Each structure stands twice: as C-alpha cells, then as structure tokens.
Image: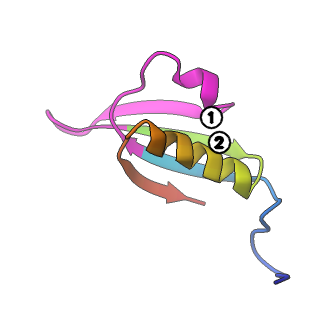
Amino acid sequence: MKTTAGLQRTQSAKYQIKIQGRQTEGWADWMDDLEIVTERKSEEITVTTLTGMVKDQSGLHGLLNRIRDLSIPLISVQY
C-alpha cells in the first residue's frame, strides 16, 4: 500500500524513546547518535530518555528490539 502523506517507512525521523531504568556501560555503542538523558522521577523510578534521528522504520524496530531483548521496560515512543 502506497501512502502519499505523513511518515514513510524508508524516511528518517526524530524520535523520543523513554525507558525505565538507568543507562548502563555499553549502551552508547548500540544507541547510534541518540542523546541519552537520565532522570530520577522518584526514589524508586529512574527514566532514561533517548532522543535523536533514526534512519528509517527498520532502524526504529531494531532499536526497540534491542530494548526488548535486554528486558528494559518501554515507557513511550514519540515521533
């Protein structure tokens, strides 16, 4: 199905991905050029926000798969 407006699956786009937890050593190696910001929301909850350009939808799914494979709770994905 061809779309005429909006985001295309082969188009790069800026995303903000929020995950629960703190950045660990080695994350930068597989986060490409995403900015990583960690905030302590409460005594028990820390949220890490990843922001930046993702090459295409395949790249986005790859990033989300890595987060899932590491059993990191996903909070949100924003375009």
Q: Position of residue 15 (x, y in %)?
A: 61, 51
Q: Residue at label 1?
A: 34
**Contact (Cβ within 8 Å) of mark 2 with mark 1:** yes
For the residue marked with disc 2, what is the amino acid?
Gly
Q: In this view, does 35 lie above or below 6?
A: above
Q: Position of residue 40 (x, y in %)?
A: 27, 33
Instruction: Say which quadrant the N terminus sits in.
Output: bottom right
Instruction: Say which quadrant the C terminus sits in.
Output: bottom right
Quadrant of residue 5 in the image?
bottom right
- 3D distance between C-alphas at marks 2 and 1: 5 Å
> Does the stretch in magenta take in 48?
no
Q: Which of 13 and 25 is in front in this view?
A: 25
Q: Where is residue 70 in the image (x, y as percent from the top left)?
A: 43, 35
- Residue pictured at 68% horizontal, 31% vertical: 32
Q: Residue at label 2?
A: 52
Question: What span is in magenta?
Answer: 19-47
